[in-house]
Image: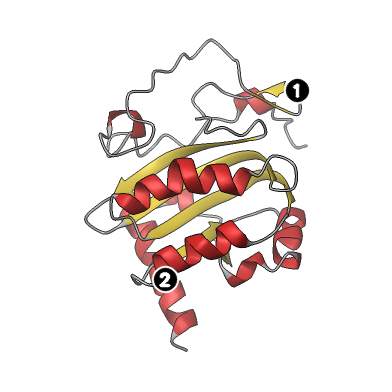
Amino acid sequence: MDKFVCMQDIEPYDNWQYLYTSETDLRSPFYGREYSQFEFTNTVYNYYIHPLWDEFGSRTLYLKVLMADYDEQYAIIEMIGEWNDAIENDIMRLKRDVIDEFIFQGIRKFILITENVLNFHSSDDCYYEEWYEDVMEKGGWIVSLNMPTHSQHDFVKARLANYVEMLSLPAWRTMKPDVLFNQVDNIILRRLNP
């Protein structure tokens, strides 16, 4: 029998904290953030989420930067909630307040771990196209990893897979960040150069 998991029990992946934490990274948009393990203030669908998730201006979507490697030029970002471009314009907030900051710091390859994106609602593709163009001209890419099937369906239906590669790697937690990055990078290279 499956165990029911409450939203507040879903924590950002933390096994890489000995390698990286966004709140101690001077180049991160989340530098200096302080967290409480006990004060639950952010919600998705009126359900509290764990306080370690970072808010970036959306009322329904939260994230955690799990790794930013400036030498290898990649970032791994885990997400939770409802990705709502139609009402909340989440992609604009994500692009302007998080992604642009990392691009400015030299990040060109983005892995979005989206297995906890419960729903996706699209609007236009302007910010996706802009993000894609920002990174592609410098050899970069954007990958969504393990998005649930129903959310992925809506994402693909909105033709956003033209800008964001959809991949499934269920065992990502068993890898170190550099191994995950290299595996994703190799998959993307094979797709681009069959």
Q: Mark 1 points at which residue?
A: 46
Determine whether 141 is above or below 190 in the image. Answer: above
Badge number at residue 26: none
Q: How crowded is mark 1: few (under 14 residues within 10 Å), some or many (20 or more)?
A: few
x 55%, y 42%: residue: 93
User: Given the image, on which type of amino acid does mark 1 rest?
Assistant: Asn
Can residue 65 be spotted in the picture? yes
Q: Residue 101: x and y, percent?
A: 37, 45
| Residue placed furthest toward the bottom | 194
Which of the two discs, 1 and 2, labels the residue nearer the N terminus? 1
Image position of 55 (left or right of 147): left
Q: Is residue 181 above or below residue 50?
A: below
Frontmost residue, 71 versus 124: 124
Q: What element carries label 1?
A: loop
State the SS at label 2. Answer: helix
* Image height of 72 relative to 82, above or below: below
Q: Residue at x 43, y 56 (%)?
A: 110
Q: Position of residue 157 (x, y in %)?
A: 76, 66
Residue 176 in sight from this viewpoint: no
Spatial CA span between label 1 and label 2: 38 Å
Tag 2 residue = 136
Residue drawn where x is 60% and y is 61% of the image = 126
What residue is drawn where x is 36% and y is 61%? 108
In the rendered image, which quarter is residue 42 located in?
Answer: top right
**x, y (%) of residue 182?**
35, 65
